[in-house]
């Protein structure tokens, strides 16, 4: 029920085609890497999947439904799109309390996800003073609030230190081991290679490869996206 | 809507605007009292308290922040992820900010009455709150604040660039409405600031529509902006 299905997805911004007839599937119980160079259309694809950008053609569904048609979207899909989506004058805890209400989960979930991302000590500070890594953790905490079956993360490792990357890997592997669906975009191959079970590689808005990761992911990536 | 009110309270912006609004009222009324002659005229009290209507400048900016501020900080993404039916997000903001705008009006009313009473008492004049005109101005001023907050939400949803939206709104009030008024002749009393002035009974108003018509027309503006805001927001890409 939590498969991600992308079918013939296309997005044109004026004369520019950002995503071109993209088709792929993402199944549960695995971490799927969504890879491509900068400007490959990864973020636009994820935004279409989440109902933020209207596709020019094609569909992107989660468990067979468009995001906008999910009854409680944040309890099905947890998304982290960028590290900047915070009001700098609001505390981390208040940010999560707002999202908890919007997600339809009790306030105690705020404390739980703060513990889960190891941010409890910073929760009372205004987000404007957070480091990039702390913002990433806060974004991840927000995505986990609804205990979703599907995680969609856009470049989640940006700004994380090596310990943070290791922690993130463990978290994503744990979600997949529970049978959940994890889709994570990245252009940093080294960090992805150790985390993913499957890869979807895009370049120039079009699909280049979908399947098991190659033993030598870097040379395969460079060949596929050149 | 309760989420929207909580969001408002969780940052300092609303309190800063509320404080600045009180300073505007106190300053405006004090200026009138220091410079005004014939303070014993029965109309001076009404003139003084009508300053509360000018707080609508602040509620307008506050309303603009509702949507354009979310775009600026990219929190709009979270709002739409939680409620993909975007019309609901916009309407919740409209309700929350209209209520907040009315709240600004009520606080402004108290400040305006207190400031005026203190000045008049200090100068030895009576404060007569028994006339209908006073209360029409007070209620009209509060409603003006609510209407401009609602219009602000619409403006901010149409012009999602925060700086652009605030600049456009203030330019309209400070400059453009005056120019348009000269071009359109009789319709000039039906432009937003003129309507607010008529609703509030500002001393600058000479020949506006009756108060109740001004109130209805201002509500119509708010509704028109709201409809445009919902239509554009549901179609717009958030990237």
Image: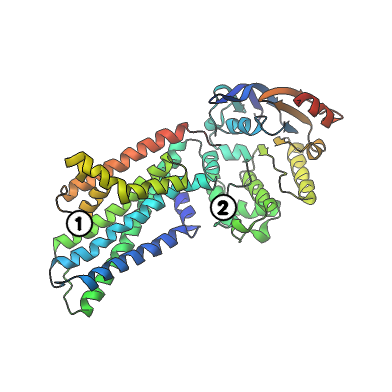
In the image, what residue occupies the spot 54% across and 23% down?
Answer: A56
Q: What residue is shown with label 2? A: A95
- One can see residue B147 in this view: no
Q: What residue is shown with label 1? A: B204
Q: Quadrant of the N terminus of chain A?
A: top right
In the image, what residue occupies the spot 59% across and 23% down?
Answer: A10
Q: Nearer the viewer, mark 2 or mark 1?
A: 1
Say whether marks 2 and 1 touch (CB < 8 Å).
no
The correct choice, above or below, for A220 with respect to B37 in the image is above
Q: For label 2, count other residues whose C-alpha is less than 10 Å away and answer few (under 14), some (14-19) or many (20+).
A: many
In the image, what residue occupies the spot 52% across and 46% down?
Answer: B72
Q: Nearer the viewer, residue A12 or B149?
A: A12
- One can see residue A213 in this view: yes
| Callout 1: chain | B
From the top left corner, tell me how far across and down residue B174 is, in percent.
32, 51
Q: Nearer the viewer, residue A22 or B84?
A: A22
Mark 2 secondary-structure assignment: helix
| Callout 2: chain | A
The correct choice, above or below, for A70 with respect to B73 in the image is above
The correct choice, above or below, for B194 with respect to B235 in the image is below
From the top left corner, tell me how far across and down residue B10 is, in percent.
50, 57
Q: Are marks 2 and 1 on the same chain?
A: no
Q: What colour scheme governs how the chains and residues are painted in the rendered image of this protein?
A: rainbow
Locate residue A225: give its quadrant: top right
Mark 1 secondary-structure assignment: loop
In the image, what residue occupies the spot 18% across and 62% down?
Answer: B134
Q: Of the numbered discs in the image, which one, if any, rests on residue B140? A: none
Q: Please give left or right for residue A135 compared with residue B33 in the image.
A: right
């Amino acid at each position: 029920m939590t498969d991600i299905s992308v079918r013939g997805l296309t997005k044109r911004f004026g004369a520019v085609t950002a995503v071109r007839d993209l088709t792929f599937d993402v199944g549960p119980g695995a971490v799927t890497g969504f890879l491509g160079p900068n400007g490959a259309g990864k973020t636009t694809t994820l935004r279409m999947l989440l109902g933020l950008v209207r596709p020019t053609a094609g569909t992107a569904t989660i468990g067979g439904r468009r995001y906008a048609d999910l009854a409680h979207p944040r309890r099905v899909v947890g998304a982290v799109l960028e590290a900047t989506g915070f009001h700098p004058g609001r505390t981390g805890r208040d940010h999560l309390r707002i999202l908890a209400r919007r997600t339809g989960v009790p306030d105690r979930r705020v404390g739980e996800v703060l513990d889960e991302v190891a941010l409890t000590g910073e929760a009372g500070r205004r987000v404007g003073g957070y480091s990039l890594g702390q913002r990433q953790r806060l974004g991840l905490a927000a995505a986990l609030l609804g205990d979703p079956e599907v995680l969609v993360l856009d470049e989640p490792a940006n700004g994380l230190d090596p310990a943070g990357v290791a922690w993130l890997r463990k978290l994503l592997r744990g979600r997949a081991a529970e049978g959940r669906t994890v889709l994570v975009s990245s252009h940093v191959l080294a960090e992805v290679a150790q985390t993913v079970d499957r890869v979807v590689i895009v370049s120039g808005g079009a699909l280049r490869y979908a399947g098991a990761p190659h033993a030598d992911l870097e040379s395969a990536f460079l060949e596929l996206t050149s | 809507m309760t989420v929207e009110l909580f969001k408002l309270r969780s940052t300092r912006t609303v309190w800063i605007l509320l404080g600045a609004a009180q300073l505007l009222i106190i300053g405006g009324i004090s200026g009138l009292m220091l410079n005004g002659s014939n303070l014993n005229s029965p109309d001076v009290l009404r003139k003084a308290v009508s300053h509360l209507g000018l707080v609508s400048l602040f509620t307008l900016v506050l309303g603009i922040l509702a949507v354009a501020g979310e775009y600026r900080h990219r929190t709009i993404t979270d709002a739409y992820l939680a409620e993909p039916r975007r019309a609901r997000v916009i309407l919740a903001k409209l309700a929350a900010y209209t209520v907040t705008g009315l709240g600004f009006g009520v606080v402004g009313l108290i400040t305006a009455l207190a400031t005026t009473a203190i000045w008049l008492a200090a100068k030895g004049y009576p404060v007569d709150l028994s006339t209908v005109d006073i209360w029409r101005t007070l209620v009209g001023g509060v409603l003006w604040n609510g209407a401009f907050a609602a219009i602000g939400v619409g403006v901010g949803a149409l012009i999602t660039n925060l700086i652009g939206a605030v600049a456009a709104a203030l330019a309209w009030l400070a400059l453009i409405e005056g120019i348009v008024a000269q071009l359109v002749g009789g319709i000039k009393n039906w432009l937003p600031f003129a309507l607010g002035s008529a609703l509030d009974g500002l001393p600058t108003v000479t020949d506006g529509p009756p108060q109740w018509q001004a109130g209805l027309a201002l509500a119509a503006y708010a509704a028109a902006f709201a409809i445009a805001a919902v239509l554009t927001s549901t179609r717009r890409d958030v990237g």
